[in-house]
Image: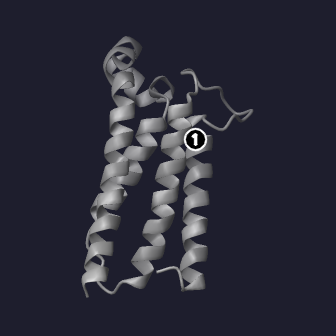
Amino acid sequence: MFRDRTAVQNGVLVAGGFFLFTGVVTGLLPTPVFDRMVPRTALEYGLLATTSLLLGVYVVQRSTLKECSGDACAYGGAAGGFVAVACPHCNAILVAAVGTSWLATYVDPLRPLLGGAAIALISGVLYRRWQREVSQ
């Protein structure tokens, strides 16, 4: 799977790009543009790193296969990974729609579960494709 140099380079670019983009936009990586309202935790950094790594492997694996089923699950996993590390209080649309107390009470505690589900989705796609590749 890791024999194609271009595929590996693309995987590294996707993993690094997702990590940087998500880290900056969600405030996990501090910037002078805005400050994150929810404290940063090691769990969020772990979820971000794991999601980024899995997306990089996904890109490498996808480029080596002719049939590419499971893309929707991988994209959903990427979106879920983004939301899992995002600051719910920093999203103006969510705050306007439901209020900060609702976000703190109901959304914030579910973010780690969403991150776990995102990682499970991407891992499931990778495993299923790997199994199919080995059996051929």
* Residue found at the very far front of the displayed protein: 135
Residue 89 in the image: state x and y as whole percent. 47, 23
* Residue found at the very far right of the displayed protein: 32
Quadrant of the rendering where the C terminus is positioned: bottom left
Q: Is residue 36 above or below residue 73?
A: above
| Residue drawn 52% across the image and 45% down it | 48
Residue 81 in the image: state x and y as whole percent. 42, 45
Q: Which residue is denoted by mark 1 in the rendering?
A: 25
Give the number of marks: 1
| Residue drawn 30% across the image and 54% down it | 121
* Amino acid type at image mark 1: Val
| Residue drawn 38% across the image and 31% down it | 111
**Colour mapping:** one colour
- Given residues 18 and 115, the one toward you in this image is 115
The residue carrying pointer 1 sits among few (fewer than 14), some (14 to 19) or many (20 or more) residues within 10 Å by Cα, namely some
| Residue drawn 35% across the image and 41% down it | 116
Q: Is residue 125 above or below residue 20?
A: below
* Residue found at the very far top of the displayed protein: 101
The secondary element bearing badge 1 is classed as helix
Q: Is residue 2 above or below residue 46?
A: below
Query: Which quadrant of the view contains residue 125?
Result: bottom left
Q: Is residue 38 left or right of residue 125?
A: right
Residue 5 in the image: state x and y as whole percent. 60, 83
Residue 66 in the image: state x and y as whole percent. 33, 87
